[in-house]
């Protein structure tokens, strides 16, 4: 197969991949909801509780927006929320928050292994963590563990210049 046919074939594969990704049923659970669960979980771990005002401050959104999202998370059973009485993560909420945190951690660790500075790595992770398939996340974790077990490979990679 000549190179122009190969390039065209790759482009067609890419278009099909995009089509398939956009044709999948969109989840009711949004990246914004994941961000809220992540912040709630972090606040509870840090302070023992999370208030709508804390969430508003950390996410830089208005208190009414927080209240609206908390109601939605409560309806979908990720949290138990009673206005003026606080909120609590349900088992579903805890599990989801933990999955998000694990993806975040793994991506951050991987980027740092690649030598990407912490600030850039954190920015990139925030954009990627919500779109990472659980299967991909599992393989990424496996690859990180592999690289950790072979420090000579990582050292060799870091010495390479592009």
Image: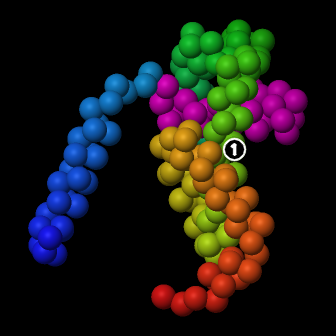
For the point 13% across and 74% down, the residue is 2
For the point 23% across and 53% down, the residue is 13
Q: Secondary structure at mark 1?
A: helix
* Frontmost residue, 97 versus 149: 149
For the point 32% across and 30% down, the residue is 24
> What secondary structure characterizes most of the magenta part?
helix
| Residue 46 magenta-highlighted | yes
Residue 141 versus residue 39 in the image, above or below:
below
| Residue 101 magenta-highlighted | no
Residue 92 versus residue 50 in the image, above or below:
above
Residue 134 figure quarter:
top right
* Frontmost residue, 24 versus 154: 154
For the point 37% across and 27% down, the residue is 26
> Considering the image in quadrants, where does the N terminus appear?
bottom left
Q: Do we see residue 69 in this rendering? A: yes
* Frontmost residue, 47 versus 8: 8
Residue 85 figure quarter:
top right
* Frontmost residue, 84 versus 5: 5
Residue 140 versus residue 1 in the image, above or below:
above
Reading the image, the residue beneath label 1 is 102
Q: Is residue 46 left or right of residue 83?
A: right
- Give how far across and how far down residue 101 sits, in percent: 69, 42
Q: Do we see residue 61 in this rendering? A: no
- Give how far across and how far down residue 100 sits, in percent: 64, 39
- Give how far across and how far down residue 4 sits, in percent: 12, 73
Residue 94 figure quarter:
top right
Tell me which segment is drawn in magenta.
29-51
């Amino acid at each position: 197969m000549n190179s122009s046919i190969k390039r065209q074939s790759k482009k067609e594969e890419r278009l099909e991949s995009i089509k398939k990704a956009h044709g999948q049923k969109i989840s009711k659970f949004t990246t914004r909801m994941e961000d809220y669960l992540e912040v709630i979980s972090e606040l509870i771990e840090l302070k023992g509780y999370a208030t709508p005002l804390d969430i508003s401050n950390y996410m830089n959104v208005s208190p009414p927006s927080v209240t609206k999202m908390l109601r939605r998370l409560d309806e979908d059973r990720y949290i138990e929320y009673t206005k003026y009485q606080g909120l609590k993560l349900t088992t579903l909420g805890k599990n989801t928050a933990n999955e998000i945190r694990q993806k975040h951690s793994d991506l951050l660790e991987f980027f740092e292994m690649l030598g990407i500075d912490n600030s850039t790595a954190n920015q990139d992770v925030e954009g990627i963590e919500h779109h990472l398939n659980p299967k991909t996340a599992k393989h990424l974790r496996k690859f990180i563990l592999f690289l950790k077990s072979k420090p000579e490979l990582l050292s060799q990679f870091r010495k390479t210049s592009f």
